[in-house]
Image (cartoon, grey):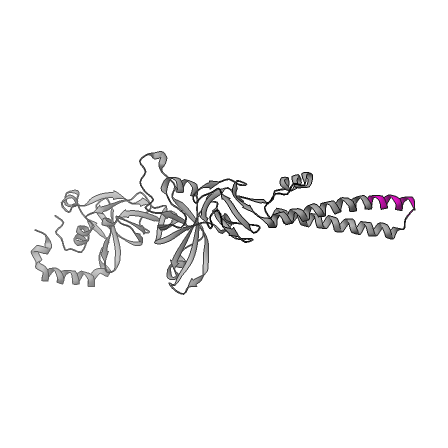
Amino acid sequence: MSGLKQLGWAGALWMLTGFYIAHAGQSMSIVLSAENMSNLGVVLGKAAPASELPLLVVPAKVVIPTSGEYIVSAAQPGLITRLLAAVNDTVKKNQLLAQIDSPALLELQGHFLKANSLLQLATVMYERDKKLLQEGVIASRREQETLSQYNAALLDVNQSKQLLGMAGMTDDEIEQLAKNHRLQGQLSVYAPINGMVIERFTVAGTRVDSLTPLYRIANLDELWLDINIPQEHIADIKIGDRVEIENIGIFPEPSDLVDNTAIISQIGVNVNPDNQTILVRARIKNSKTIQQVAAVRAGEKITVKIIRASGKSAFSIPNTAIAQYEGKSLIFKRTATGFEVCPVTVIAMQAEKAIVKSAALGGNEVIAVGGAAALKANWLGLGSGE
């Protein structure tokens, strides 16, 4: 029968109170034979060095970097005749997305052709007057006048080219227009980047104004995590901390496993007054693989764990290895004659394990990973040790 049963609850309470009072002079070691250790149900194990410390488990949202999103608009007013891409389609840079019948484009092309003709005439006049000036036939003032006319015509042509480019015409199309003088009233709209169509804003047969949005396209090669950290925990977070995406699925083949890691790159300075959180941003390291394998997508709300490298002084032990006494956490380190009672600082608690720091741990110590409660009772004299 145990010491508690022999003493009864009143005696046990008296003895426990006595040990609390006398603890200052109490030995921090337990002499215990292997037989008694077995009787107490003590299980031995080692404290494993913990390379990382879990800091927080918080919600996050998967977002597209602002530099990766593009709005494709109608550069000129007109009637949409074709839309060639749908939502979730993957598109390549310069791929045709839409066609618009645009009278305004015809006007721009006509102005370009007129300006180009005037430039050719101004060029001929300037070359003639420059030659006549060299021969002394005309005054320099006249040569300066034709030079001014040439420069004005050149400026008008360049401006017309810029407007046609802004209207959606390519350099090759503008060059062909200058050569064959064939006006083309159909405006072609091209993809500005390699990416995916995230949103379509209109349908074929719609009349649109200049700069009316047609598509939203995003480059999904990189994704961010926007994490709202409670302001009382922001001091625990540092740039470079690792963020682990949780619950991304179980994959049957080793080749399907994915590194579900992001790295904190920005920490905000403003507190959201509505929920007293601070925005922290992390960059997902392998966004394309996570999207393909783990189905993590832009706009999704997920759970993440923020982790930091711990250095060499932290250790992972089972929760069952820790005993509580007077508000302190204790472990029991194996010695030649029994166990040494060692205080530890608990850094983080997980489902089955705890991350601790202790001056008594160096990495190779054997500790009691089971039966800590019985060892504490034995240390306090509440058990017979049998």
Residue 61 horizontal/vertical position (percent): 39, 52
Does residue 286 appear in the picture of this structure?
no
Q: Residue at x 36, y 36 (%)?
A: 256
Q: Main secondary structure of the magenta part?
A: helix
Q: Quick check: is 214 in the magenta stretch?
A: no
> Is residue 361 toward the left or the right of residue 199 in the image?
left
> Is residue 11 toward the left or the right of residue 337 in the image?
left
Q: What are the residue bounds of the magenta stretch?
A: 126-137
Residue found at the far right of this picture: 136
Question: Which is more toward the observer, 257 or 209?
Answer: 209
Residue 335 horizontal/vertical position (percent): 24, 45
Does residue 327 appear in the picture of this structure?
yes
Q: Quick check: is 135 in the magenta stretch?
A: yes
Question: Which is more toward the observer, 110 or 202?
Answer: 110
Residue 322 horizontal/vertical position (percent): 24, 51
Question: Which is more toward the observer, 361 or 352?
Answer: 352
